[in-house]
Amino acid sequence: MADWQAWSRAFLRPEGRVVDVEQDGASHSEGQAYGLLLATWHGDRDAARRIVAWTEAHLAVRQDPLLAWRWMPGAGVADYNNASDGDVLYAWALLRAARTFGEEEFARRAREVAGAVVTILLATDPSRPGRTLLLPGAERFRDAGGVIVNPSYLMPLALHDLGAAFAHPELPAVAEAMADLLAGIATDGLVPDWIEVTSEGWRPAQGFSADFGYEAIRVPLYLVWSGRAGHPAVTAARTAWAARGDGPLPVRLSRDGRTVLEESAAPGYRAVAALVAATGASPAEVPAPPFDAAQPYYPATIHMLAGLARHDRGWG
């Protein structure tokens, strides 16, 4: 509970807005979802209600049930396109909050968002007819040449849970299709931040990061959280991080894992690496580093999420 209180003081405003201090105080749909997941885990019903109220008032402004992905102080919504990870995680967080707190309206809204993910955000995989992919957003990510995909938007546990709760078999199906796609990518390297899938297979997405970086660091986090410790993307990340020892963690690596492009001493990144390392040993052998609210928003938040993943896996 002390970690939740520290995170809340640093990043959650009284009105329920989760703030990315390092990005000029921006708020994002995935940040609101993260906050709701964490508030629910810690039994903070008041915070959960405030987070949902702010999100609904400021991001639920599209002409469909999805959320605008970015809001800026003094300007409001800065981009009306959605981000599918924010929508999936927000629906899942609402569902978990509804179960924990008995909030029927949360469940109703979760159903609405999950349905919109099915009808708006799924696309046919050009490389394998019959398989679907999760679009990063409703607009701008597909054309005649292929489909842009962000691998870190795959959270199998959330998609399976939402699919079972609301009778949407398309959601588990896309989770399995995406997991299979990432397994193929990880057989010869780390999963990159962004890819493009065409009729010929996958390739780096032009104009996007092709490294294993700040986005892709969530891939092994979500897979381990989902009980998929044996997935090749988890193995690739575990191997790459283990090779670098106990110093600052590489947070940007070339896809072959040989070149460190950026590293960080923030304990949140090390917490994700410890979670991943525990899949090759045992959770007791690889404990998480202590939480530090003085670290920037992003590593602080994934630090907390790694703790929630350990809790959900029954690792204490």
Image: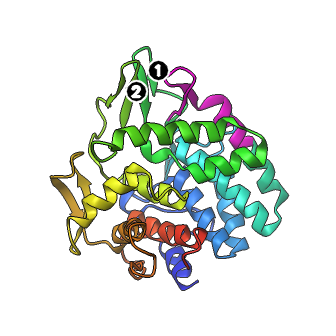
Let me know if residue 35 appears in the view: yes
Q: Does the magenta stretch include residue 130?
A: yes
Disc with the residue nearer the chain's start (1 vs 2): 1
Name the side, left or right, on which 282 lies relative to 155: left
The part of the image, by quadrant, that contains residue 298 is bottom left
Q: Estimate the x, y position of residue 43 in percent, counting from the top left.
A: 69, 76
Residue 80 seen by the camera? no
* Residue extending farthest left: 259
Looking at the rendering, the stretch of residues picked out in magenta corresponds to 112-135
Label 1, label 2: how far apart the Cα atoms are: 7 Å
Which residue is identified by label 2? 197
Asked whether the residues under the numbered discs 1 and 2 touch, taking CB atoms below 8 Å apart as contact, a structural biologist would say yes
Tell me the SS state at disc 1.
Answer: loop
Element type where label 2 sits in the image: strand
Q: Which amino acid does label 1 sit on?
A: Pro
Residue placed most toward the observer, 310 or 65: 310
The residue at the far top in this view is 144
Residue 206 point in image, percent of width and height: 29, 29
Location of the C terminus by quadrant is bottom right
Measuring 57% from the left and 57% from the top, which residue is drawn there? 32
Outermost bottom residue: 2
Identify residue for label 1. 126
